[in-house]
Image (cartoon, rainbow, N blue to C red):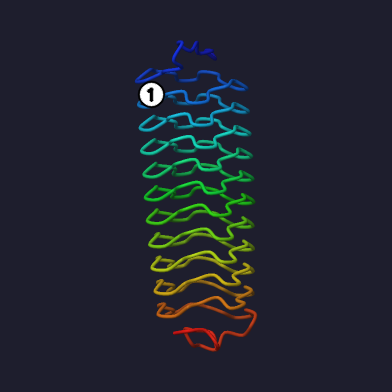
């Protein structure tokens, strides 16, 4: 049974139990859901700019097509939550647990995922220009076909992450761990991998135009069919070491 939640005058749901509540199409700008139990609620198409979900339990929550600009999800639990097609410009997911969350087709410009747990999260086809993933855990994440130009992954753990066909021009991976990560067919022009650990990462067929690998650990990394041909050096000719 779906329960439609009724807001108080202040729009506050602190520590409330809202499992299965229906918020689709509602206006929640600045609403406070911190610490609430929201297992399976429906926020699809809702306007949640500036809403506060810090520490909330959002397992199975549905945010498809929602407007989440400036919303705060730090420390929240989002296992298998659905954010596909949502607008997340400036949304804050730092320290959130997003294992299995679905962001396919979402617009995540300048969203903040620093220190978040993203194991198995799906970002395929998402627009991620400028988001911050520094220090996040991404084991097995799917970024295939995503637009990640200028995204920041410095110090992130990306073992087994999938970036095949993604647009990563100017993305920053310095100091990140990429064991078994897949970059085949990705566009990496200007991407920065200096100091990154890329053991057994796969770059076959990738476009490496002036990507920087100075000081990177490339043991077992595969560059077959990459363009231009990878020469085995860690820095491209003409770029500073």
Res 79 quadrant in image: top left
Res 182 quadrant in image: bottom right
Give coordinates of residue 213: x percent, y percent.
47, 78
In depth, the one of 185 and 31 nearer the eye is 31
Q: Is residue 3 left or right of residue 55?
A: right
Q: Is residue 80 left or right of residue 94?
A: right
Q: Give the class, few, some or many, for how many residues have Cα within 10 Å of label 1's Cα (few <14, many ≥20).
A: many
Give coordinates of residue 108: x percent, y percent.
56, 46
Q: Is residue 117 above or below residue 82?
A: below
Q: Is residue 53 above or below residue 14?
A: below
Residue visible at 45% across and 20% down? Answer: 19
Give coordinates of residue 177: x percent, y percent.
40, 66
Give coordinates of residue 168: x percent, y percent.
58, 64
Residue visible at 63% across and 34% down? Answer: 65
Residue visible at 50% across and 30% down? Answer: 61
Q: Is residue 141 above or below residue 78?
A: below
Question: What count of labels does the image hold?
Answer: 1
Residue for badge 1: 36
The quadrant of the rendering that contains the N terminus is top right
Mark 1 residue element? loop
Res 48 quadrant in image: top right
Residue visible at 58% across and 58% down? Answer: 148
The quadrant of the rendering that contains the C terminus is bottom left
Q: Is residue 227 above or below residue 40?
A: below
């Amino acid at each position: 049974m779906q329960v439609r939640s009724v807001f108080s005058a202040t729009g506050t749901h602190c520590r409330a139990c809202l499992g299965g509540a229906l918020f689709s199409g509602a206006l929640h700008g600045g609403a406070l859901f911190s610490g609430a139990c929201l297992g399976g609620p429906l926020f699809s198409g809702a306007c949640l700019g500036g809403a506060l979900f810090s520490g909330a339990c959002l397992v199975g929550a549905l945010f498809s097509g929602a407007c989440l600009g400036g919303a705060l999800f730090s420390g929240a639990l989002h296992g298998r939550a659905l954010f596909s097609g949502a607008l997340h410009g400036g949304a804050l997911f730092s320290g959130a647990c997003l294992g299995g969350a679905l962001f396919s087709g979402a617009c995540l410009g300048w969203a903040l995922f620093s220190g978040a747990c993203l194991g198995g999260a799906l970002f395929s086809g998402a627009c991620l220009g400028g988001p911050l993933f520094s220090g996040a855990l991404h084991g097995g994440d799917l970024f295939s076909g995503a637009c990640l130009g200028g995204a920041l992954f410095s110090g992130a753990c990306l073992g087994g992450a999938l970036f095949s066909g993604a647009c990563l021009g100017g993305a920053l991976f310095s100091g990140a761990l990429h064991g078994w990560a897949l970059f085949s067919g990705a566009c990496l022009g200007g991407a920065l991998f200096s100091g990154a650990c890329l053991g057994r990462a796969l770059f076959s067929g990738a476009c490496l135009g002036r990507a920087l690998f100075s000081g990177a650990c490339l043991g077992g990394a595969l560059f077959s069919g990459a363009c231009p041909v990878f020469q085995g050096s860690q820095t491209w000719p003409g770029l500073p070491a």
